[in-house]
Image (spheres, rainbow, N blue to C red):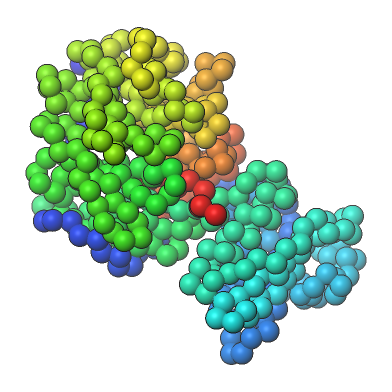
Amino acid sequence: MGRGRHRWLAALACAALLAFSGMAAAELRIEISEGVEKAVPVAIVPFGWEGELSAPADVAGIIAADLARSGRFAPIPVADMLQRPTAGREVDFDDWRILGVEYLVVGRLLPAGEDFTIQFQLFDVLRGRQLLGYRQPARRRLLRATVHRVADMLYEELTGVPGVFGTRIAYVTVSGGPDARHYRLVVADADGENARVLVDSPAPLMSPAWSPDGRKLAYVSFERDHSEIYVQELRSGARQRVSARRGVNSAPAWSPDGRYLALTLSRQDGNLDIYTLELATQLLKRLTRHPAIDTEADWSSDGRWLYFTSDRGGGPQIYRIAADGSGRPERVSFEGSYNARPRVSPAAEQLAVVHNDRGNYRIATIDLRRATLQVLTDGRLDESPSFAPNGETLIYATRQGNRGVLATVTVDGRIRQRITALEGDVREPAWSPFPAN
């Protein structure tokens, strides 16, 4: 048995009553480690505020941080600005051309009863024309989230790709020594802010998976000394144990319509196989029957296929099977001796996988049409890839020294970020879908 298979089996083997906490968690710190060679210079002018007292949020600062974090844009410092307009009629394009700015954002935050309106305009400085203008209502308690939505609109206008600044990430933190581990399942904004603990436990937590509507998380807990799968509502904290069968219960993945979970179970013969569970009826269906290990399934975006890891060919590789169980599994990965943990891109054109690259476990993508593989990362122990809902970026777990951290990489490999917590390890990331309107 090879070293890679030993590692894979060890991960599967890991597969106090937990309570909804809702308490704040240590927020994450995001650093761009590699961006595009020439990020586009933009100016996000401080927004005007027409209310009493101080502004409730630094709208321009949040937008500038979002765009900078994308790695594609370089907001100029506020101190360098020659003017600070808050409306288009106040803009002198020559002042911005002198600074080399290509795009300009101006706006105001307006009181609207107990809530607000964000008024903003986007200009092409070189051509001297407006590209976008909008008045965005913002509820007081959702002001920061709404500013992220504004940044998403600006990003899409400038790149043609929907922004993901208004999305969230789920992850697991681990703290304490070897004999006193503590696990937390946390949800935070995509920029690491507003981190909130959903589950706080002395027992391992694994494999968080977002429901398609972004309102629930499925995850694996060992709170009763063996693996069980739960589904928890984010808003209320209410949760349901959906699989506590004898043996292994692991690797939940939601179907695109939210009706089913794909699971890895060992319920009948002790062998790990892929099942689907209809949540409304608890109807369980076995899809694979093979003496090898079949695990870590993920759905295609149309719900027709399940992609999964299997060592039926001698080492971990990616296969797919029809979601209704018809037909035989087909192998889809062919480069290298180890490909595992498949995640399907939103457009179903690529798989993200953990790939053994000369003894290093790295994140790679497989082009499903061309059957070609591209290695994106350069760590020694990169794992748990998850696509952003726009398909442009992957978040994954890696190591920094002796600590577990998160990182992101764009699917072209050009832009990378490192995401760390102030203490403890961070692992098992999952990127949310786009927020519901």
Image height check: is 141 above or below 315? below
Which of 39/304 is in front?
304
* Image location of residue 376, percent across then percent down: 51, 32
Residue 108: x %, y % from top left: 70, 75
The picture places residue 109, in percent across and down from the top left corner, at: 66, 75
Q: Is residue 397 visible?
A: no
Can residue 260 be seen here? The reply is yes
Residue 330 position by quadrant: top left
Residue at the front extreme of this rendering: 281
Judged left or right of residue 326, residue 11 is left
Residue 315 figure quarter:
top left
- Residue 146 vertical position relative to residue 311 in the rendered view, above or below: below
**Which residue is found at the position 23% from the left and 28% from the top?**
284
In the figure, is residue 162 to the left or right of 123? Answer: left
Q: Quadrant of the N terminus?
A: top left
What is the number of callouts on the image?
Answer: 0
Q: Nearer the viewer, residue 31 or 10?
A: 10
Who's the residue at 50% across and 23% down the image?
366
Query: Which residue is at a point 10% across and 32% down the rendered structure image?
Result: 246
Q: Quadrant of the C terminus?
A: bottom right
Residue shown at the point (16%, 25%) measured from the top left: 266
Q: Residue furthest bottom?
A: 53
> At which x and y percent is residue 433?
48, 46
Answer with the quarter of the image where residue 237 lies: bottom left
Is 155 on the left or on the right of 395, as rendered?
right
